Image (cartoon, helix red, strand yellow):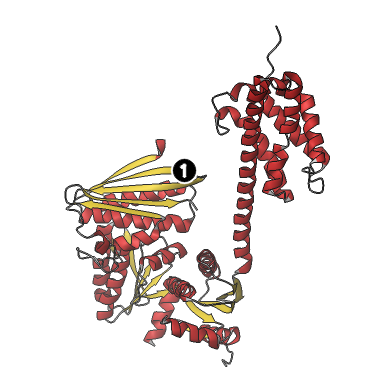
Amino acid sequence: MAGASGSVPIVTIAGCVVVAIRDDLDDQDILTLQDELVEEVSRRSANGVVIDISSLEIVDTFAGRMLGAMAQMAGMMNARTIVVGMRPAVAMTLVDLGMTLEGVETALNADRAIEAIRAGQA
Amino acid sequence: MEDGRTAVTLASAQDVAYAREAAKRAMTEIGASTVRRTKFVTAVSEIARNAVIYGRGGRIVFEIREQGGVRSVVAECSDRGPGIADVAMALTDGYSTGKGLGRGLGGAKRLVDRFEIRSSETTGTVVILESRAR
Amino acid sequence: MAKEVTTGSVLVEDFDRVLSGWLKVQASENVKRTDLVSAKESEKQSRDLLAALADVAPEAATADGFDLSDAQWAPVREALEEIAENRTERGVSAAEMGWFIASLKQPFFEILHEELGETSAELMREIWSATRIVDQVALYAIETLVQKREAIIERQRGEMTEVSAPVVKIWDRIVTVPLIGTLDSFRAQTVMENLLDAIVQWEAEIAIIDITGVSTVDTLVAQHLLKTASAVRLMGSECVICGISPKIAQTVVNLGVDLPNITTRVDLQSGLAYAFRRIGVAAGER
């Protein structure tokens, strides 16, 4: 039930593809992860993608763009993408960068995100 | 970090991650708040990536300074690239010569206390970032 | 052979006379501030400073100039720090601090005059030397006092910001922060940090910012609110701004500031009603 990007485990819970991003990923790892997530959405016919970034100490424009792109790609496959667990300092930094990720949904944690996606399905 | 200086060679995506790690260590050492540290590390990530992707690599040197009882970290990033023809334009949000969306340089400037950039066709681009502990 | 009399030698040989002379001048010139600093404290401070000077000055105060920031002057600086610390707390002014030190000149001059006679060249030389030492010490004392006071102001500013923007958990999953007075960049940043931390701490789904008490909303304040709302959303919570008076609504629109995708309400009550509805608690919204 799991795909794996290097050692980032991707799991599917209640029709949602869930991944917790590790802090030490470089740009190449991030692109690999994006590929695998899109693959997984397709394979599972998932309704949602939950990306937990609570371990991330920073999100720069590269990682921010990946989140935006991920939401767009999943959207085209009829799945919602919800980013959860962003740290306060990361949120403030993104706002200063002018990256407010308008196209991406957010939630406090994975529980709430899965709840929201299931509620949307009903 | 003896004598307060650390240098990271920038040649690959992995090196950008090393630069972030060094930036984080330096900011932690001067006792900066989480928010200040996060902003500085993010800015370093942006300019280090620029050096790798558009500047044909280079290096970034971190130095801890102290002025008037307040400590700060200075990062000087120099690349071997073709230089930036119009620096003012490059600092404008939405501008980019590469395929990025061009928030990198202008955004990095807003994340630090001091931002300087020098660029020429012969010497490449040098970016200096400084963030105080408070 | 008669021993040479200098400012340095007076400090060492006539220590007690200089001290008692100084204390007397302090009393007569009314620089003691006995209302703020007790006679005993004053005497101890004066003695400590003079002792440090007697240790250092004869060697360090050379004819061709000296610098109080040099390492050898450290004992004098320490004594001054202590005095400044004490007097800042008591509310002594910078001028009083300077005069307190400057009054040390009188006993010096008296003793030098006595030892060296009416008009000798030595007298002129030593008066200049004593003046230079005392003036430098006085300037350093004033500077230290001002620095300490600035540090206190800075600290109080921080404390005031904390007090004036307390984030409270008003209901399960709802936090609120009432803003009062003016919102400068420093305060706006602190408010944002406190609010975002509270969202994590309480797992708050709604963050209410009540601007009823904010005196004016200009472009800068509007931008700060916008930034805060964006950061709140990025964290997965929803920002509600309430306390939008007719005047604020007019200003914001006239400024040409757009508040896109931000929920706004007239007052805290309707803001709260909205929040209850969002998290599924029954309450009628006005």
Counting from the top left corner in percent of width and height, residue C27 is at 82, 40
Looking at this view, is B102 or A77 the one in front? Answer: B102
Looking at the picture, does residue C108 appear above or below residue A61? above
Residue at 74% x, 32% y is: C106
Counting from the top left corner in percent of width and height, residue C100 is at 72, 40
Is residue A25 visible in the rendered structure shown here?
no
Side of A103 relative to C156 (left or right): left
Side of C221 relative to B111 (left or right): right
Looking at this view, is C103 or A109 the one in front? Answer: C103
Residue at 53% x, 74% y is: C204
Looking at the picture, does residue A121 appear above or below residue B51? below
Tell me the quadrant of the picture where the N terminus of chain B can be found: top left
Furthest-top residue in view? C1
Looking at this view, is C78 or A52 the one in front? Answer: C78
Chain identifier of the residue bearing label 1 in the image: B
Looking at the picture, does residue A79 appear above or below residue C71? below
Side of C125 relative to C230 (left or right): right
Looking at the picture, does residue B10 appear above or below residue C81? below
Tell me where residue C45 sits by quadrant: top right
Residue at 49% x, 83% y is: C251
Q: Secondary structure at mark 1?
A: strand
Is residue C9 visible in the rendered structure shown here?
yes
Count the labels in the image.
Answer: 1
Counting from the top left corner in percent of width and height, residue C257 is at 42, 80
Other-residue count near label 1 (Cα within 10 Å), few / some / many at <14 / 14–19 / ≥20: few
Furthest-front residue in view? C119
Tell me where residue A16 sits by quadrant: bottom left
Counting from the top left corner in percent of width and height, residue B16 is at 29, 52
Q: Which residue is mark 1?
A: B66
Callout 1 amino acid: Glu
